[in-house]
Image (tube, rainbow, N blue to C red):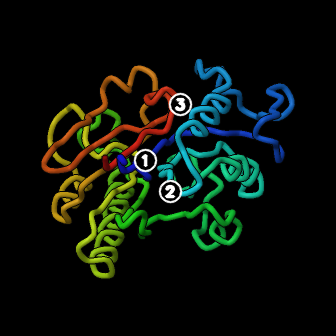
């Protein structure tokens, strides 16, 4: 019997429910604050739900690296997190650039449903693999990088990934490592980044990231590079369907 893949990934769900909703009974006019139809994402929540249910079992895990909710406050974000709760499987979440509701790891962990986990500058263990995470940031080689505004955040995020990897290796030695970032760790302008150098140093096996949408998807760097499998997992890049990783 073929061994099933139990780890999936999808990011950038961009949910915006204004109240607690039944996952099968969503009224777009009354239940949603920011319709993604503005970006061509026609009822994307239904597409995610249907694809997810076809693939994911309760024993599986789905990694979700950021831009989960448009909410500005945690109380509002709970509507979106509770929508995700209704889907099968364990969910491991990490922050993106639109997680405005996220200010404290302890606060969000206290209110998360039991089948969901939040990691940021630390790690968890999934199916015998170590999963590390941080948000990441715009790379110095990106045309939009502003030295004055971005350098400190970029350096800080590299430090947070280092902390995550150091802790994981110290406590879970010998396990394969998956890294969840929101921002891409490489771009097509060439050159490495601090994130990429760290992942090579710690022998990371797989890195997933999101953030890129629309035309930017075609600029994504993916594939097997320097011994690391790199994959863009933003919703629209995956046609709103979670993808199996570590096959």
- Residue 13, image x and y in percent? 58, 39
Give the total of numbered labels.
3
Residue that badge 2 annotates: 94
Mark 2–mark 1 Cα distance, whole angstroms, equals: 8 Å
Which label's residue is closer to the chain start, 3 or 1? 1
Q: Which residue is drawn at 40% across and 49% down?
A: 5
Residue that badge 3 annotates: 240
Q: Residue at x 54, y 57 (%)?
A: 59
Disc 2 is placed on an element classified as: strand
Question: Would you call the spot at circle 2 few (<14 residues within 10 Å), some (14-19), or many (20 or more)?
Answer: many
Q: Are dots 2 and 1 in contact, CB under 8 Å?
A: yes
- Residue 247, image x and y in percent? 31, 46
Disc 3 is placed on an element classified as: loop
For this view, does 238 lie left or right of residue 197?
A: right
Q: Which residue is drawn at 34% across and 56% down?
A: 179
Mark 3–mark 1 Cα distance, whole angstroms, equals: 17 Å
Which label's residue is closer to the chain start, 2 or 1? 2
Q: Residue furthest bottom?
A: 171
- Residue 64, image x and y in percent? 50, 49
Which label's residue is closer to the chain start, 3 or 2? 2
Question: Would you call the spot at circle 3 few (<14 residues within 10 Å), some (14-19), or many (20 or more)?
Answer: many
Residue that badge 1 annotates: 182
Q: In which quarter of the image is residue 9?
A: top left
Mark 3–mark 2 Cα distance, whole angstroms, equals: 18 Å
């Amino acid at each position: 019997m073929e061994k099933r893949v139990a780890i999936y990934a999808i990011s950038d769900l961009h949910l915006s429910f204004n109240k607690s909703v039944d996952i099968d009974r969503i009224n777009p006019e009354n239940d949603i604050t920011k319709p993604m139809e503005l970006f061509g994402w026609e009822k994307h929540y239904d597409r995610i739900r249907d694809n997810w249910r076809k693939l994911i079992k309760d024993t599986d895990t789905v990694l979700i690296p950021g831009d989960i909710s448009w909410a500005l406050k945690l109380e509002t974000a709970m509507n979106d997190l509770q929508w995700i709760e209704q889907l099968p499987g364990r969910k491991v979440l990490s922050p993106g650039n639109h997680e405005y509701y996220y200010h404290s790891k302890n606060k969000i962990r206290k209110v998360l449903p039991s089948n969901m986990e939040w990691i940021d500058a630390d790690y968890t263990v999934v199916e015998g693999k170590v999963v590390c995470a941080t948000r990441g940031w715009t790379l110095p080689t990106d045309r939009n990088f502003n030295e004055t505004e971005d350098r400190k955040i970029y350096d800080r995020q590299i430090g947070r990934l280092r902390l995550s990897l150091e802790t994981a290796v110290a406590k879970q030695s010998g396990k394969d490592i998956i890294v969840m970032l929101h921002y891409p760790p490489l771009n097509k302008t060439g050159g490495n980044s601090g994130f990429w150098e760290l992942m090579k140093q710690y022998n990371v096996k797989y890195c997933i990231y999101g953030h890129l949408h629309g035309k930017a998807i075609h600029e994504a760097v993916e594939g097997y590079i320097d011994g690391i499998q790199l994959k863009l997992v933003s919703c629209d890049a995956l046609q709103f369907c979670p993808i199996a990783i570590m096959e």
